[in-house]
Image (cartoon, rainbow, N blue to C red):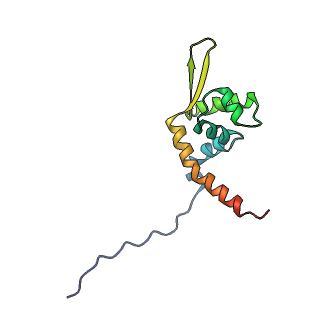
Amino acid sequence: MTTHRPERPAAPGPQTIHDDACPVFGPALELVGRRWTGSILTAAAQGATRFSEYRAAISGISDRLLALRLKELGEAGLVERSVIPSTPVQVRYTLSPDGIALVRALQPLARWTRGREDDTPQ
């Protein structure tokens, strides 16, 4: 007695990829690719909360650019800004849940990049 096995559906053929089919990547890559953004996200993931802590953790960044990037990351919903009414007023920046998710998503890319650097002849 032979057993009848159902036929597998044919594998779909290659699909054409159009640039307009992938617009979601553009803004994310543009934001993450801006100078100092990766360093700011890394500093936040390592526990920096105050402006001075970010500045101390990120060698070479200017105050103006750090303030601009923190504002951009806040507007993108990746960093949360909290004002603590005290004397003097304290401002703290922490990763939002989306910011934490982004850092986790970028970690494999960072590992891949480090692996390529290790393999690159000097």
Q: Which residue, as the protein is rendered here, is positioned at the far left?
A: 1
Question: Which residue does the image show at 59% across and 25% down from the upper left?
Answer: 92
Residue 88: x %, y % from top left: 64, 13
- Residue 110 pos. (x, y %): 63, 52
Quadrant where the N terminus is found in the figure: bottom left
Which residue of the protein is positioned furthest toward the bottom in this rendering? 1
State which quadrant residue 16 falls in. Answer: bottom right
In the rendered image, which quarter contains the C terminus?
bottom right
Horizontal side of 55 relative to 85 (left or right) equals right
Task: Please tell me which residue lies in front, 34 or 56.
Answer: 56
Q: At x 59% / y 28%, what residue is drawn?
A: 93
Give me the residue at 69% from left, 41% from top. 34
Q: Please tell me whether residue 50 is drawn above or below residue 60 in the rendered image.
A: above
Task: Say which of 34 and 6 sits in front.
Answer: 34
Q: Position of residue 78 (x, y in %)?
A: 56, 35
Give the residue drawn at x 62%, y 41%. 42
Left or right: 2 in relation to 98: left
